[in-house]
């Protein structure tokens, strides 16, 4: 006899936490994890309460003194081994991502590789932490700055990049000598847990990296914990602002990366075929659930708009949508049923607002995956800046085309939007591109590059309400974020020189 859903749930494994190098079960509250392609619950995840967060922080605090004093070269060696293990276990990691997030296997692989690139950058920590030195800053005086770890630091991450976004944080944080507590998204926590085990296998001492699973209760316990020195957050803007305000009120250093509405500006001289291929991947890849997804195309001139819309409409008819495990799928499902309802409601809103729905994905069903959270691609033309489908982050396979008559008007739109994460311009005119990149009020800019996600040697962050805090994620900013500067001034008097009594402010006389 088939098990009832309740009996089935009883047999489903519950993912606990990872504290002090060990898996820690937890009988507190649980949430279910669903495979978005099948709509079936696959496992549960425990939610850490305040006491469990304190256990993780205690482990991280105990591990701190010896990890902080471990030579950067030796910390780097652990990361080199970690990188190797990530490569050896690629198939398992990407399968966990696809089965909990829904994105295609190729896409999951892409996020893992971008995460590994941050690990590779962190392997250069002996070079990155060298500090600054000024010999002979004054008579017999040398001065230098060194960058010391903050202590125990935490990361809170979103569902849409379960492997890469945590890797924007912990490889650099631990390379700098901190110990870490990660709170991954409750929607797809299995891949980060798997990576925690790989870190241990790579030789990371117990307690240096810990995971507490959970939701708001767990996050609040992190924010209120006075032993945690800093918090890195990535997620939606409303939560990012809450994390920034609450975390800084509790005296922590906080960087909180938020939501986005990324515009692509298409100039009349652009190569439309190239543009359309680039736009479709950037708008509908990962079902539009990327903070750098293109969600608005601003076409300069009606001819440009007509050409783009016609070509996109034709190509979208051939888009292959299905389970991310099927190698022929180009787009998978949305992450949850609730999120699909939210995205669908925006299609209704757009129609009611008077935008032209050129491609309507609402009727889609995927054979054999009828209970999955699929939504076909949607394309709106004639969208204007007061519409909600233009203003709000929808985070789904919905692309809005806005028609304008000049580059200046296109740039005003981008600059006036509340978000400033990414943007790009398509043109063959270097002067137009330079004018755009010099004056646009956005943190990451592409020139004929639709997803200008900075490589690991640069840092990632937006402007306006896409980032709360001063420092970006990974790259050189991560060294600044995860360390505290100390400046040392040293003098050794030699040759019998004697200091005379002097009440004036120390200076090099003019
Ligand atoms: P989310 O804000 O719902 O959740 C992010 C994290 O915050 C999760 O770990 C979640 O458990 C926790 N959380 C959720 N609600 C909370 C609350 N009320 N109080 C405290 N903690 C809470 O985001 P999401 O849906 O997981 O991810 C999608 C969002 O993340 C989008 O807005 C996207 O643009 C954004 N994002 C931004 C970037 C960036 O770099 N700027 C990158 C990836 C994703």
Image (tube, helix red, strand yellow):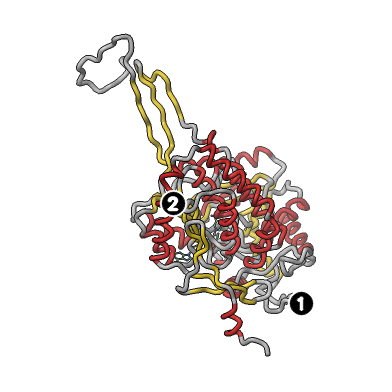
Q: Residue furthest bottom?
A: 1
Please name the residue shown 58% across and 65% down the image. Answer: 188
Query: Which sits in the foreground, 415 or 294?
Result: 294
Query: Which sits in the foreground, 47 or 505?
Result: 47
Badge 1 crowding class, 10 Å Cα cut-off, few under 14, some 14 to 19, many 20 or more, is few
Please name the residue shown 44% across and 40% down the image. Answer: 69
Q: Quadrant of the N terminus?
A: bottom right
The reply to whether dot 2 and dot 1 touch (C-beta < 8 Å) is no
Find the distance from the CA under tag 2 to the CA under tag 1. 46 Å
Query: Which sits in the foreground, 26 or 223?
Result: 26
User: Which labelled disc corresponds to residue 367?
Assistant: 1
Residue 319 coordinates in the image, percent (x, y): 76, 65
Q: Is residue 110 above or below residue 499?
A: below
Residue 334 coordinates in the image, percent (x, y): 64, 69
Query: Which sits in the foreground, 444 or 357?
Result: 444
Q: Nearer the viewer, mark 2 or mark 1?
A: 2
Residue 100 coordinates in the image, percent (x, y): 63, 67
Q: Which residue is mark 2?
A: 153
Q: Is residue 443 visible?
A: no
């Amino acid at each position: 006899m088939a098990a009832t859903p309740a009996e089935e749930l009883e047999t489903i494994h519950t993912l606990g936490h990872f504290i002090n190098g060990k898996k820690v079960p937890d009988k507190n509250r649980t949430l279910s994890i669903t495979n978005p392609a099948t709509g079936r619950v696959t496992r549960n995840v425990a939610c850490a309460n305040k006491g469990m967060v304190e256990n993780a922080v205690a482990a991280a605090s105990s591990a701190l003194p010896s990890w902080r004093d471990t030579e950067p070269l030796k910390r780097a060696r652990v990361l080199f081994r970690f990188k190797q293990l990530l490569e050896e276990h690629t198939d398992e990691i990407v399968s966990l991502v696809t089965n909990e997030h829904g994105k295609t296997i190729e896409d999951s692989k892409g996020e893992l590789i971008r995460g590994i690139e941050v690990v590779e950058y962190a392997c250069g920590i002996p070079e990155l932490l060298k500090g600054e030195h000024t010999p002979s800053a004054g008579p017999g005086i040398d001065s230098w700055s060194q960058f010391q770890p903050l202590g125990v630091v935490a990361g809170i991450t979103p569902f849409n990049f379960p492997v890469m976004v945590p890797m924007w944080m912990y490889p650099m944080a631990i390379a700098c000598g901190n110990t870490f507590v990660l709170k991954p998204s409750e929607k797809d926590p299995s891949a980060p847990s798997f990576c925690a085990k790989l870190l241990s296998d790579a030789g990371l001492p117990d307690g240096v990296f810990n995971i507490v699973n959970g939701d708001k209760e767990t996050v609040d316990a992190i924010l209120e914990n006075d032993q945690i020195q800093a918090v890195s957050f990535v997620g939606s803007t409303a939560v990012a602002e809450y994390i920034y305000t609450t975390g800084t009120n509790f005296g922590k250093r906080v960087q909180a990366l938020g939501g986005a509405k990324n515009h692509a500006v298409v100039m009349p001289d652009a190569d439309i075929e190239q543009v359309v291929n680039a736009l479709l991947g950037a708008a509908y890849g990962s079902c539009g659930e990327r903070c750098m997804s293109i969600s608005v195309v601003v076409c300069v001139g009606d001819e440009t708009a007509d050409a783009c819309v016609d070509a996109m409409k034709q190509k979208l008819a051939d888009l292959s949508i299905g389970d991310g495990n099927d190698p022929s799928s180009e787009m998978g499902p949305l992450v949850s049923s609730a999120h699909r309802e939210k995205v669908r409601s925006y299609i209704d809103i757009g129609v009611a607002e008077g935008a032209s729905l050129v491609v309507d994905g609402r009727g889609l069903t995927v054979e054999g995956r009828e209970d999955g959270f699929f939504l076909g691609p949607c394309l709106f033309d004639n969208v204007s800046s007061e519409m909600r489908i233009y203003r709000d982050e929808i985070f789904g396979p919905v692309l809005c085309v806005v028609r304008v008559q000049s580059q200046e008007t296109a740039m005003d739109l981008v600059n006036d939007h509340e978000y400033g994460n990414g943007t790009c311009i398509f043109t063959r005119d270097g002067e137009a591109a330079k004018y755009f990149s010099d004056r646009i009020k956005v943190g990451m800019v592409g020139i004929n590059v639709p997803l200008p996600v900075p490589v690991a040697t640069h840092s990632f962050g937006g402007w306006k309400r896409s980032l709360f805090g001063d420092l970006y994620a990974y790259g050189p900013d991560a060294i600044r974020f995860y360390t505290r500067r100390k400046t040392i001034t040293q003098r050794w008097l030699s040759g019998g020189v004697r200091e005379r009594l002097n009440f004036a402010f120390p200076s090099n006389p003019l």
